Structure formats: C-alpha cells, structure tokens
Image: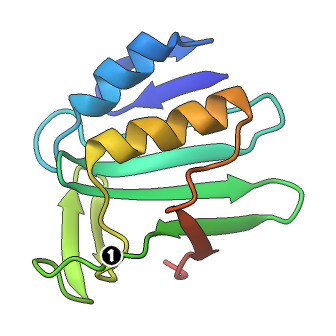
Amino acid sequence: MKFEGQNFAAVSTPSDHVLESRLLALKSYGRHSYASLTDAQGNYLQVAGGGVTCLVERFDVPTSTRLRAFHDKPSPVFPDGTVLAFGAGELRLKSDEWFHASAVVEIFLCFKHGRSYPGTVHWRPAPKT
C-alpha cells in the first residue's frame, strides 16, 4: 500500500495511526486537501476536502471503473450541485456524497485491510470530469 497526499511525503505501508492522523488533518482549503491510498494492483481510494466536507472515490483496476461513495442521509446543508473546492480544483457533489472525516478514516481502513465497507457506504459511477 502507498499513501500519498497534497504536501506530505508518500508513505509505503502506512500504519493505521498514520492514515487516521493524516486523514483527520485534511481540510478543503490550504496545504492538505486530498490524499489517496493505492494497493499493489493499482486499485486506489481517494479523498478530497476535509472535516465535514469530504468526497470519497475509488478506482477498480480490473473494470477500469471510478466509483463515488454516497450514503443514505443526504445533507440538508449541501444540496445537489454544491461545489467542493480543494487544492486540485472543484467538483460538484450530490447531497448524499458529503462525508465526515471520521467516516473517511473507516472507509480507508476497510480498503487497507481488505474488509467490507461499512453498510452505510454505497458506490455509484463517478461523473466524467
């Protein structure tokens, strides 16, 4: 596994603690606003934003498919089409695509350890960018 992010050194085989601390330090502004975790086959999980404004996507190598995470509780604060601005640009999200950083940590740990994602996390094809 390789953990990379905006303005921090890449870490091969990151500990759970390193993943958690760096993911919780992400912000949708400033020096640290996105990160990714890639396995040996090239599948990856990526996050943009931070705090209560996180977007999670994954890429599946065998199907060449990029998927976006969503959940069952749409945000009343961020309606469909709200823009997430972060260090790599801007993306429009649906109201059910906003995640809290603590949920992102759990999703990343599931990916790292090959566990099933939480039952509250679902995946759909990511929009073409």
Up the image or down, 15 lies above or below 41; here it is above
Q: Residue at x 53, y 68 (%)?
A: 68
Q: Quadrant of the N terminus?
A: top right
Up the image or down, 105 lies above or below 68; here it is above
Q: Is residue 50 left or right of residue 110?
A: left
Residue 25 quadrant? top left
Residue 122 quadrant? bottom right
Residue 100 location in percent, x, y? Answer: 26, 51
- Residue situated in front as seen by the camera: 29 or 93: 93
Q: Residue at x 16, y 42 (%)?
A: 27
Q: Residue at x 76, y 40 (%)?
A: 42
Helix, strand or loop at label 1? It is loop
Q: Which residue is mark 1?
A: 73
> Is residue 99 in sight in this rendering?
yes
- Residue situated in front as seen by the camera: 96 or 46: 96
Residue 90 location in percent, x, y? Answer: 26, 68
> Is residue 10 in sight in this rendering?
no
- Residue situated in front as seen by the camera: 111 or 4: 111
Q: Residue at x 55, y 81 (%)?
A: 128
Most distant residue in the right direction: 62
- Residue situated in front as seen by the camera: 116 or 85: 116
Most distant residue in the bottom direction: 80
Q: Is residue 97 left or right of residue 122?
A: left
- How many circles with numbers are drawn on the protein? 1
Dot 1 crowding, Cα within 10 Å, few <14, some 14–19, many 20+: few
Up the image or down, 103 lies above or below 23; here it is below
Q: Is residue 116 left or right of residue 16?
A: right
Residue 96 location in percent, x, y? Answer: 35, 77
Residue 30 quadrant? top left
Q: Amino acid at mark 1?
A: Lys
Up the image or down, 14 lies above or below 121; here it is above
